[in-house]
Image: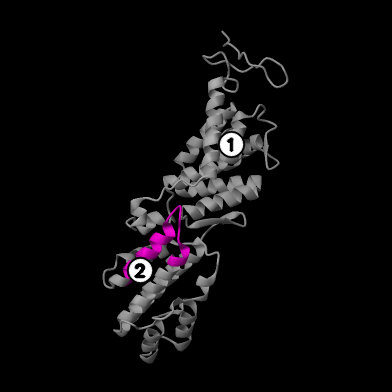
Amino acid sequence: MSSAKCKGVTKSGERCKRDAGSSGYCYVHDADAIAERVAQKQFLQIQSEFEIPTKKFSERRGLKPVSEIIQVDEISQNLRHSLWNVLSKNFLLEYSDSFSSEIFTYNGRSVYNFFTILWIDHFKKPLDDLPKPKDQIVKGLRRYFDSFKWYEVYDFLEFTINYFESKILVNEVNFVLIRELSGFRFVGGVFTDITTEQEVEMLEEEISDKTFLGVSSHLKCALTLMSARENPDYRNSIKESISAVESLAKAITGKPKATLGEALKVLETSNKIHPALKDSFLKLYGYTSDEGGIRHAMLIEPNLTSDDARFFLLSCTSFINYLKSKI
């Protein structure tokens, strides 16, 4: 016995041939289903137009482990959901609503062919198992995406971005990676790491070290300022990273007003650091004075980014680790 057909009419004026649901209409023509899809699209549009504060107490206070803040070998639910939303907003939702799945395109590339190639070449699954209704394909992909290991998410995104060759996808994916402090960026067709697991471990060790409380306090503050999801303060994060080095310099010399230059001079005199290395550190980090505060050409830049703040945080941490080994 055949099931009842939808009472809806297609754009060409013909009777819809899809199976009807309890309302007498298919998922494309059902009024409630249409309203739900429209509401979902409007919600995504509102999210993109207005900033919704999501900074948590643990993030503001620097109470989360560094490995949970800078994501290197894991993906948080926030990052996973945000990456999926980039795909939904750009083509998956429209594909689910499209009348003909065979002719629907994104950036000039067939979305139907994308699913076929994805199923055959990436998932290595039998083509017979590819769901036929468009909405079921998207729902099936969502289930796969939610079950991916963290590195499989990046594998899938590499495949997807390279198929569609969309600059919008690249920009929006990288924006999410920056906002959620992922240790990776999509550059030149591949995801490349900008923060290693070893760097994260080193930072975590220095922040938890109680030997020099001033040093760990400045590093924790730098991390907190950098990791504020909605309102990061990269300029002051850099200042705190440099101040952590200054704090250790004062401990090395035993002088509360010591500059980094004075501390390095002590190490140079005792033959614990090469003069050329000392000079390179001075040029990179600058120094602090009572009158002028932190003086560093980098801080004059009008458009500091998370990459700038991360570089200073990790390089200052590495330098602190090096200085400790000398004392």
Q: Which mark is first along the chain, 2 or 1?
A: 1
Q: Amino acid at mark 1?
A: Leu
What residue is rendered at 50% in x and 66% in y?
A: 308
By what rule are the colours in the image chosen? one colour
Where does residue 229 sit, x and y in percent of width and height? Answer: 44, 53
- Mark 1 vs mark 2, foreground winner is 2
Where, quadrant-wise, is the N terminus in this rendering?
top right
Indicate whether 323 appears above or below 201.
below
Q: Secondary structure at mark 1?
A: helix
Residue type, label 2: His
Left or right: 268 with respect to 112? left
Q: Secondary structure at mark 2?
A: helix
- Residue 49, can we see it? yes
What quarter of the picture does the C terminus occupy?
bottom left
The single residue placed furthest to the left in the displayed view is 210
**Residue holding disc 1:** 92
Q: Give the CA distance from mark 1 to mark 2.
A: 44 Å
Q: Residue furthest bottom?
A: 269
Residue 86 image offset from top left, x and y in percent = 55, 43
Magenta residues span: 215-236
**Magenta segment, principal secondary structure?**
helix
Is residue 222 rendered magenta in the image? yes
Residue at the disc numbered 2: 218
